[in-house]
């Protein structure tokens, strides 16, 4: 789901967080909390922890600023829409081929290291674009290199998920990923503002080149730590060759999942009419600059780090659907808030509200996906849902870019906010079937 961060960052975080949730099962006894700054024991777990830290540094230094880099080199809002749409759609379509390639590759670690290395290499190529590339070709190259970055990253994601489940023992997964996700968030709070500061302190596009170069180095270091992980011997049963998706009639027998897919496509279309363009609007239509983008992103991350603890308890007490309805009722009005932004600091209350509400919405969304999918076929259903929502996101970003060129930025803020309200009513009155029926059992009402 899209958050207060950029469209691309949200997409990546959604898939990684969902993958971690799929690997995490509740322990039989409560586990003590693990401080985010507390290192795991030496070995594979520590290397994996450092991989997460360095990957977060790389993402924080780069992902928020790729669209702004394109804008600096002359991209139109329509081209910014294409930049986000192609990466979101094509990247999502790579999950299934990635799963097949990961199964075919001799070992998962080498496949992940290869694909993630190629993805990080694209950051270095982005940094080199201003050297000798004609102005008319620069934006096209940014779109291509950004697309390849997402394609390679998503090709390796299924194997990354599978190997992660093998690396982290089941009885400590909750504590371990809490620690790993904590340090990832802390890194984003520090390095996103740092990237913005470096960009505005340099003339022209030198700041972008510097941050992308540093992002490449951090990403390369992450791969080096990942290669130090010892891959356990695969304990899974032999893979059954054949169709990777459930048959259509099996999907249609689970109407709750079908309705969730329809809602998710519509919701992500509504979100991405506006989300990819918030930072562009901040820089083009106000006195904001790249430093403002970094500082404001950090505000949302700080608040989100605190509020996610609260929403975990709310979700456990009220359930995923009620939590989604609570948070989803606020989200459209956060979008309307952008209608009144005239200065970078006008975004502060918007990001404060986003930092409070979006962690709860995302957590409940992940939980709802788990509830609506059968455990034995969950990876296939999740891959299908990701593909469909990726289509909705890509179409939304493309249409949003066109709307800006024709009617201006305020048109997408109005359209996105109003469609999010429609999405809330869809959730309230359309996606309301009992979960147990979706799993093929007797229907039991949620409420």
Image: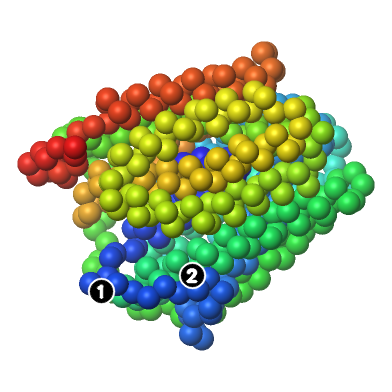
Residue 29: numbered disc: 1
Quarter of the view holding residue 422: top left
Left or right of 103? Residue 408 is right
How was the colour assigned to the protein in this rendering? Answer: rainbow
Q: Percent position (x, y) of residue 382? A: 34, 46
In percent of the image, x 47 and y 48: which residue is there?
359
In percent of the image, x 35 and y 35: which residue is there?
325
Up the image or down, 5 lies above or below 19; here it is above
Q: Can residue 230 be seen in the rendering of this structure?
A: yes
Left or right of 263? Residue 257 is left
SS under mark 1: loop
Up the image or down, 82 lies above or below 146; here it is above
Up the image or down, 271 lies above or below 188; here it is above
> Foreground: 163 or 254?
254
Left or right of 160? Residue 255 is left
Considering the image in quadrants, where does the C terminus appear? Answer: top left
Q: Which residue is mark 2?
A: 179
In percent of the image, x 24 and y 51: which residue is there?
377
Discs 1/2, front: 1
Left or right of 74? Residue 348 is left
Q: Residue furthest top?
A: 406
SS under mark 2: helix
- Callout 1: 10 Å neighbours few (<14), some, many (20+)? few
Q: Percent position (x, y) of residue 273? A: 56, 26
Q: Earlier in the sequence, mark 1 or mark 2?
A: 1
In percent of the image, x 53 and y 56: which residue is there?
305
> Foreground: 103 or 153?
153
Up the image or down, 326 lies above or below 223; here it is above
Q: Can residue 11 be seen in the rendering of this structure?
A: no
């Amino acid at each position: 789901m899209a958050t207060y961060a950029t469209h691309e960052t949200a997409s990546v975080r959604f898939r990684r967080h969902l993958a971690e949730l799929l690997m995490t099962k509740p322990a039989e006894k409560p586990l003590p909390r693990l401080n985010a700054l507390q290192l795991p024991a030496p070995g594979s777990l520590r290397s994996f922890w450092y991989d997460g830290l360095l990957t977060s540094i790389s993402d924080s230094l780069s992902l928020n600023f790729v669209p702004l880099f394109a804008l600096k080199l002359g991209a139109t809002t329509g081209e910014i829409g294409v930049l986000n749409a192609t990466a979101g759609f094509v990247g999502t379509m790579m999950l299934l081929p990635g799963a097949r390639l990961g199964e075919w590759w001799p070992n998962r670690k080498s496949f992940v290291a290869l694909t993630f290395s190629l993805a990080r290499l694209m950051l270095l190529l982005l940094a080199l674009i201003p050297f000798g590339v004609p102005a008319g070709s620069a934006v096209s190259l940014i779109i291509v290199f950004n697309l390849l970055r997402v394609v390679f990253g998503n090709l390796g994601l299924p194997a990354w998920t599978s190997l992660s489940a093998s690396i982290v023992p089941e009885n400590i997964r909750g504590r371990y990923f809490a620690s790993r996700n904590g340090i990832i968030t802390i890194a984003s709070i520090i390095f996103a503002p740092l990237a913005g500061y470096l960009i505005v302190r340099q003339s022209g596009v030198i700041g972008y080149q510097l941050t992308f170069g540093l992002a490449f180095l951090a990403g390369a270091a992450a791969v080096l730590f990942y290669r130090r992980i010892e891959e356990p011997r695969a304990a899974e049963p032999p893979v059954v060759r054949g169709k990777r998706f459930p048959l259509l009639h099996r999907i249609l027998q689970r109407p709750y999942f079908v309705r969730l897919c329809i809602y998710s496509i519509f919701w992500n279309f509504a979100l991405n009419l506006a989300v990819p363009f918030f930072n562009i609007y901040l820089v083009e239509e106000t006195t904001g600059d790249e430093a403002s983008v970094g500082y404001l992103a950090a505000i949302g991350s700080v608040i989100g780090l605190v509020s996610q603890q609260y929403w975990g308890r709310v979700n456990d007490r009220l359930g995923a659907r009620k939590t989604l309805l609570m948070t989803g009722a606020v989200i459209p009005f956060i979008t309307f808030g952008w209608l009144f932004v005239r200065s970078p600091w006008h975004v502060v209350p918007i990001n404060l509200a986003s930092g409070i509400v979006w962690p709860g919405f995302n957590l409940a969304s992940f939980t709802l996906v788990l509830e609506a999918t059968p455990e034995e076929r969950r990876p296939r259903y999740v891959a299908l849902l990701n593909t469909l929502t990726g289509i909705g996101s890509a179409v939304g970003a493309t249409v949003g870019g066109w709307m800006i060129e024709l009617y201006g930025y305020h048109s997408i803020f109005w359209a996105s906010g109003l469609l999010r309200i429609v999405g809330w009513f869809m959730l309230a009155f359309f996606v309301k079937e009992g979960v147990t029926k979706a799993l093929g059992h007797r229907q039991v009402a949620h409420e």
